[in-house]
Image (spheres, rainbow, N blue to C red):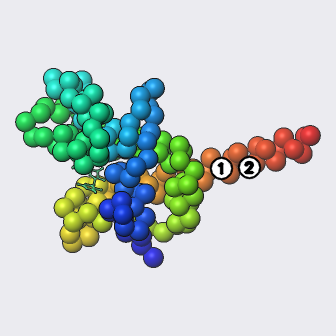
Amino acid sequence: MTIYFYKVWQPYGCFSNFSPHHIEIQGQYWLTVEHYYQAQKFVGSVDAVIIPMIRACETPEEAAAMGRCSSRKLRPDWDLVKTTVMREAVLKKFLTHADIRETLLSTGNEVLVENSHCDYFWGCGADKTGQNHLGKILMSVREEIRKQQFLTAISSECLENRG
Ligand SMILES: Nc1c(N[C@@H]2O[C@H](COP(=O)(O)O)[C@@H](O)[C@H]2O)[nH]c(=O)[nH]c1=O
């Protein structure tokens, strides 16, 4: 059965980028994945001064509003890099926080869908025809973590057998 998520307070809210789970990337602390994602829009852009301001936002809603400000200039390669940026941050989130990692793994092979009515790129959009890139990233992160755990289990078993 497909698992739909969107708002933090709804079922599977920890899959939202707005969930209160910090990440650390290149020695910098980000309150949520959303803070990191919105700030990366301006790396190398003439409006890079906004990055520390986005990082300092108290809520992901504020960070998103700042990052979505249409008068600011986005980095020129943003459309090319945004899914890579998002995947790195989402992977980091689930590697950092064991409780939500278990929630993600507990979804098995179910399809995960960001049920955003207005976002046809990260979510499924109002008519469910959207590209659902956030759901796809979560499923690929789930697979990567599963593989990592399998390899760790195999190598510790080998070490014990050599023991
Ligand atoms: N969850 C969630 C949203 N969805 C998130 O918005 C981000 C896309 O932003 P942008 O590329 O600036 O349009 C991405 O992280 C997507 O998952 N948006 C919201 O306004 N509220 C919310 O609770």
Label number found at residue 92: none
Instruction: Establish if 7 lies above or below 63.
Output: below
Q: Position of residue 69 (x, y in %)?
A: 13, 40
Instruction: Label 1, secondary structure: give it.
Output: helix
Q: Nearer the viewer, residue 52 or 42?
A: 52
Say if disc 1 is inside 8 Å of ligand 1.
Answer: no
Residue at the image position 89 percent from the left and 45 percent from the top: 161
Mark 2 touches mark 1? (CB < 8 Å): yes
**Amino acid at circle 2:** Ala
State whether residue 113 appears in this view.
no
| Residue at the extreme bottom of the image, as rendered | 1
**Amino acid at circle 1:** Gln
Q: Nearer the viewer, residue 82 or 50?
A: 50
In the picture of the structure, the residue carrying the numbered disc 2 is: 153
Q: Nearer the viewer, residue 140 or 47?
A: 47
Residue at the image position 29 percent from the left and 33 percent from the top: 56
Q: Position of residue 32 (x, y in %)?
A: 37, 44
Q: Position of residue 18 (x, y in %)?
A: 34, 51
Label number found at residue 149: 1
| Residue at the extreme right of the image, as rendered | 163
Residue at the image position 83 percent from the left and 44 percent from the top: 158
